[in-house]
Image (cartoon, helix red, strand yellow):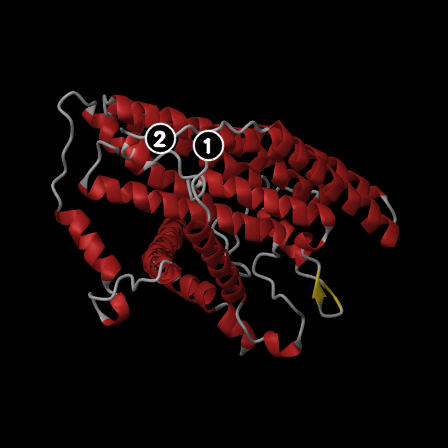
């Protein structure tokens, strides 16, 4: 019974595929899988927008959406209808073809990453031997989509926003990839399925998640900081800083095209969070090996971890102010990048040292001491300018 509940979606898909002719079964299987991913994560996007607006409202001592439907639950539907019915305004001098393709490519690139994410046991679209490499390869298409949006608009504001966004995304994509290499080193595989299976074992009740090691915890924190910047989330939301460059690279977008950019950013955030869960948090495995947890489906644990990370993103957005551009770039190149490189050395030493308290002490020191030194260096290097206020007479 437990196995049937866990594999209900897999069994349902096999049953539906079996209803079509043999020659059309591969195509039917792919269509069903892609449709399921789009429906599930588009629904999660709608739920997240409601949760974020309600959560930020509570943090800021206001209600948030509360008019459309009970507790404002139908607000995402109202926003979707509004986006579909708003006029699509395209600048006369814009490159119409590229202007149209930019948001489509952004959403497509965000969705392509889900092909290698194991959402549950036996629930992965494609089990590639180089699944992690594929994920970061298709994710790099988002930079191309951002450039297309800024360049095709023929607007100085859009182009400036696109250049700033690309500089940010490339700067943080380097540590994002380096932070994941420590997991590849330990797992000895680029397959996301193999990485999750290696973590789905237990010592007593405790799981063998990579985050419960010094290099794994440091890698997870560095990965999530870089993922926040990659997703243009606060406090790294400089590309669409309204007070500085209006709305960044999508200044000249309106209507449903603007909604596609909004959708693409959230879908990309879900995908990157899903990769963090796969690499460091055990994927679909349960947090403990208690017997009463065995009846809970594997996909439940994946989405529970995903919702927990989403709530952290919302919490950070409601708490931290936006960084300046120089602070953002200095953080990437002077702190996060050196820490990811040192973390690679830490993971290598952890692998070759015998198990015991000495390994924890050495590897823990290799993570904590450089973090303190680098942060102190950045603090002392920072030169604060004295503000001079001039009052009208």
Residue at numbered disc 2: 146
Can you tell which mark lies on residue 169?
A: 1
Would residue 314 be found to the left or right of residue 216 on screen? Answer: left
Q: Quadrant of the C terminus?
A: top left
Q: Residues within 10 Å of mark 2 (few under 14, many from 20)?
A: many
Residue placed farthest to the front in the image?
A: 393
Q: Residues within 10 Å of mark 1 (few under 14, many from 20)?
A: many
Q: Is residue 117 above or below residue 3?
A: above
For image coordinates 29% across by 64% down, the residue present is 63
Q: Is residue 358 above or below residue 292?
A: above
Numbered disc 2: secondary structure:
helix
User: Is there a contact, CB below 8 Å, between mark 2 and mark 1?
Assistant: yes
Q: Quadrant of residue 314?
A: bottom left
Mark positioned earlier in the residue sequence (2 or 1): 2
Would residue 169 be found to the left or right of residue 292 on screen? Answer: left
- Give percent across and percent down for residue 154: 23, 21
């Amino acid at each position: 019974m437990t196995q049937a509940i866990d594999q209900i979606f897999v069994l349902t898909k096999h049953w539906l595929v079996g209803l079509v002719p043999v020659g059309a079964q591969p195509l039917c299987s792919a269509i069903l899988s892609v449709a399921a991913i789009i429906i599930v994560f588009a629904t999660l996007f709608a739920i997240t927008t409601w949760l974020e607006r309600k959560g930020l409202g509570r943090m800021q001592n206001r209600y948030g959406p509360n008019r459309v439907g009970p507790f404002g639950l139908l607000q995402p539907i109202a926003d979707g209808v509004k986006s579909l019915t708003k006029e699509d305004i395209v600048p006369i001098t814009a490159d119409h073809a590229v202007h149209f393709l930019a948001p489509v490519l952004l959403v497509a690139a965000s969705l392509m990453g889900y092909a290698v994410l194991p959402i549950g046991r036996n629930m992965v679209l494609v089990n590639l031997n180089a699944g992690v490499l594929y994920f970061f390869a298709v994710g790099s298409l988002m930079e191309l989509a951002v450039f297309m949006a800024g360049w095709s608009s023929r607007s100085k504001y859009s182009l400036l926003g696109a250049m700033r966004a690309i500089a940010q995304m490339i700067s943080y994509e380097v540590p994002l990839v380096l932070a994941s290499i420590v997991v590849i080193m330990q797992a000895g595989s680029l397959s996301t399925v193999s990485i999750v299976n290696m973590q789905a074992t237990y010592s007593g009740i405790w799981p063998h998640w990579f985050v419960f090691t010094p290099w794994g915890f440091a890698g997870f924190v560095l990965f999530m900081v870089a993922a926040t910047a990659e997703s243009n989330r606060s406090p790294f939301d400089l590309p669409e800083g309204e007070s500085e460059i209006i709305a960044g690279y999508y200044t000249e977008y309106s209507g449903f095209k603007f909604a596609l950019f909004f959708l693409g950013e959230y879908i990309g955030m879900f995908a990157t969070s899903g990769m963090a869960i796969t690499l460091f948090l055990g994927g679909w495995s349960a947090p403990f090996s208690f017997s009463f947890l065995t009846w809970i489906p594997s996909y439940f644990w994946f989405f529970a971890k995903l919702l927990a990370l989403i709530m952290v993103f919302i919490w950070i957005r409601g708490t931290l102010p936006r960084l300046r551009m120089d602070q953002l770039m200095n953080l990437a190149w002077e702190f996060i990048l050196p820490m990811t490189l040192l973390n690679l050395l830490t993971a290598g030493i952890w692998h070759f040292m015998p198990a015991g308290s000495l390994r924890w002490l050495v590897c823990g020191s290799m993570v904590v001491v450089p973090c303190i030194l680098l942060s102190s260096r950045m603090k002392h290097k920072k030169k604060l300018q004295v503000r001079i206020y001039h009052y009208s007479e």
